[in-house]
Image (tube, rainbow, N blue to C red):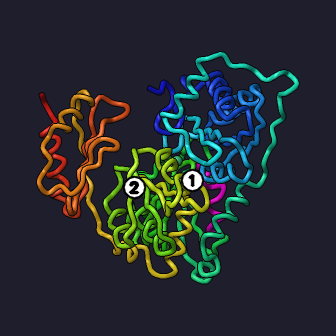
Amino acid sequence: MAKYFGTNGIRGKFDMLTPQFALQCAQAIGIYFQRGKVLVARDHRLTGPVLHKAVLAGLQSVGCEVVDLGMATAPTAEFMIGKTKCNGLIIITASHNPPEWNALKVVDGKGVAISKERGEEIEKLMDGKIELAPWDKVKEVEEYEDAVGEHLKAILKEVDADKLKKRKLRVVLDCANGTPALIGPRLFKELGCEVILLNDKIDGHFPGRPSEPREENVQQMLKTVKEKKADLGIAWDGDGDRVIMADENGAFIVGDRVYALSVLLKLKEKKGKVVTTVATSKAVEDVAGKFAQEVIYTKVGAPYLSEEAAKGKCAIAGEEVGGVIWPEVSLAKDGFLTAAKIAEALCEKSLSNWLKEFPFYYNVKGRVKGDPKKIMDKMEKLPLPKDAEKVIKIDGIRINFKDSWVIVRPSGTEPLVRVFAESTDKEKAEKLVKEYEGKLSGN
Ligand code: MG
């Protein structure tokens, strides 16, 4: 079991992820990347600058050549791995977590994020003796100036900018007071859009709204879209890999509908495998089915998506919270490319009209408290309902029915099991959650 690595890197508050600990982690990560060339970036959190210095020092002390991007979004940093031909990347970012959190997210030279399982190898190195580089082999840090420019160029290649310039979309951009402000506004201005900015002042206190772009956190964006009669509203999380939207009526578009639409747009251009986690909406399968393309399910967590996408023949990969990987550009979830691709589609018809192309699923969440292992054993023994079409046991147990599905998964952090159901019929989703909560509760 990994001691420090979670679903996506080493995450903690400042009393856990201290500068000393970050330095020690960076030394082990530097050794894991064969003391080669390592890229470093950070988000805008208040503990970022001090942890950033510790990470640079850790990497340099074991002889790594370091390329430093300074402050950058996660998608920009991950895109730059290929450009700079680095062996790996450390991004200091806690993504959608509250301001007091921070994390070291680690990505390998192919652009695949390091999972909990691979993180164990780094932890073993941390437990052993760290051998420092000889004194005369400690290298300088190279600063890379125009990563945003490079990333923008790559995004603009993927969309028809001329078509968008003619359309002159009015878009509301909510930058979460985070690093999306470094690239989001510039991108949409280059696409000829009329841009209305919210929370575009970078501030590690997150004064405008919490980092996670949940519906209750982006009310200002939804309201502004309505008031300003905008064509599209966009809200990123604090490091820009996740994106959610508002249609032209100011209605909230949840992450997995953003993903399902991305799949539709991608498969119209190019066929291939569709990768997603077991917790993602059936809308993704419905869309892939229209194009007769296979859906590959992975465990929940971005590293598993990028691992699967790296195997090749993948058209697109994405998760339920609005993170979409476009493999032609990088194996990172890229909230800017996702936003640009959907904006491009609006040249044809409105967002609400696009969303009519696949079913709307209601989702309902529940939980059963108790020992997750015991509850999962019980779930395993339950007879399969007669109308079940498919059972997926990659991460928890998911049962697909014709127009609905239910998943039972142990929580990674609490003594409970989560029950999640989705259906085109709201009552059916509620019934499924109640049914499984009932079957799994008690002894
Ligand atoms: Mg994020």
Q: What stretch is highlighted in magenta?
A: 178-188
Check disc 2 and report the residue beneath it: 296
Work out which quarter of the rendered image holds the N terminus and state it.
top left
Give the alpha-carbon distance from disc 1 to disc 2, as whole Å.
16 Å
Q: How many labels does the image show?
A: 2
Q: In front here: 195 or 270?
A: 270
- Amino acid bearing label 2: Ile
The prevailing secondary structure element of the residues shown in magenta is helix
Q: Does the magenta stretch include residue 271?
A: no
Image point 63% across, 76% down: which residue?
A: 161
Judged left or right of residue 291, residue 153 is right
The answer to which quarter of the image holds residue 114 is: top right
Badge 2 element: strand
Above or below 348: residue 223: above
Q: Position of residue 216 (x, y in %)?
A: 38, 52
The C terminus - image quarter: top left
186 magenta-colored: yes
Give the mark toward the camera: 1 or 2. 2
Upstream in sequence: badge 1 or badge 2: 2
The residue singled out by tag 1 in the image is 331
Residue name at image x 25 percent, y 27 percent: 371
Q: Which amino acid does the dot numbered 1 rest on?
A: Leu
x and y percent of residue 251 in the render? 38, 66
Q: Can residue 101 be seen in this view?
A: no
Residue 293, given in percent of the width and then of the height, sits at 39, 67
On the image, the x and y values in percent for residue 361 come to: 27, 62
Identify the secondary structure beneath mark 1.
loop
Q: Is residue 210 shown above or below 357?
A: above
Q: Tell me what residue is drawn at x 51 percent, y 47 percent.
A: 307
Residue 108 visible? The answer is: yes
At label 1, counting other C-alpha atoms closer than 10 Å, the crowd grade (few under 14, some 14-19, many 20 or more) is: many
